[in-house]
Amino acid sequence: MPTESTLLTADRFAATARAAGAGAPDHVLAEVGTELINRWSEPQRYYHTVEHLAACLDLVGDEPVVALAVWGHDAVYDPTAADNEERSAVLTGELLAECQVPAAVVEEVTRLVRLTAGHAVAADDRNGALLADADLAILAAPWPDYVRYVAAVRAEYAHVPDDLWRIGRSTVLQSLLALPTLYHHTPALESPARTNLHRELDSLTHTPPPG
């Protein structure tokens, strides 16, 4: 039985790019798709992998502009850097230009990639809401799956000492909890996601008594 990651092929990217108006030859689309899959397969990734990419693509469905943003949103992932979203947006714009995707589509896709830096979505931003819901869907997972997600992210930040990890991760969780709404198209996820976030935050900010 094929896994999610095996369904990610250069052809899948090419079909999405074509649906968004790409005019480049097939071999160019295949090369760009292969580059993106290779980037999502880099060894420093434990959560931001092709499995995460595939899951997000499945959630956004038949929306080529948003799907292109999914392909690009973590195309650059350096756990030691603070500007991954910006670098991903720039790279995605360059790659889509190679694919001869219309300029207006490239502009929208790169806007969406930048939005994932904080996941703040305006009320009338349907594309942004669709992308943010997909990217944050893991937060509403059953607790054992959520714990595995956190462990994978922690593995990506293995170079960070525990005390600094707790501070940094707590800041991320607090910023997510401060959003007025985490989910726009899938409101049923709101309550379990916030429960998970509060539970993790509590574990980071309260040191258990000595046993």
Image (tube, rainbow, N blue to C red):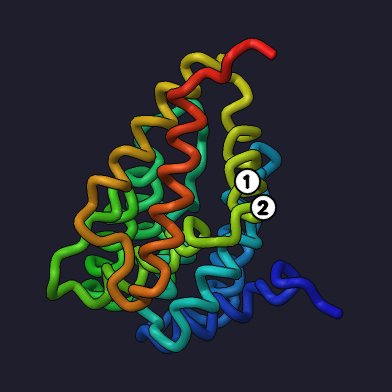
Q: Quadrant of residue 98?
A: bottom left
| Secondary-structure class at tag 2 | helix
In the picture shown, does residue 89 fall above or below 34?
above
| Secondary-structure class at tag 1 | helix
Contact (CB < 8 A) between labels 1 and 2? yes
Q: Tell me the CA gap for discs 1 and 2.
A: 5 Å
Marking on residue 97: none
For label 1, count other residues whose C-alpha is less than 10 Å away and answer few (under 14), some (14-19) or many (20+).
Answer: some
Quadrant of the image containing the N terminus: bottom right
The reply to whether residue 160 is visible in this rendering is: no
Question: Residue 15 or 1: which is nearer the viewer?
Answer: 1
| Residue labelled with disc 1 | 147
- Residue under the point 40% across and 82% down: 64
- Residue type at tag 2: Pro
- Residue type at tag 1: Val
Quadrant of the image containing the C terminus: top right
Q: Quadrant of residue 7?
A: bottom right
- Residue under the point 60% across and 33% down: 154
In the picture shown, does residue 162 fall above or below 125?
above
Question: Residue 44 or 31: which is nearer the viewer?
Answer: 44
Where residue 121 appears, x then y in whole percent? 21, 62
| Residue labelled with disc 2 | 144
The reply to whether residue 188 is visible in this rendering is: yes
For label 2, count other residues whose C-alpha is less than 10 Å away and answer few (under 14), some (14-19) or many (20+).
Answer: few
Q: Is residue 151 left or right of residue 59?
A: right
- Residue under the point 39% across and 74% down: 188
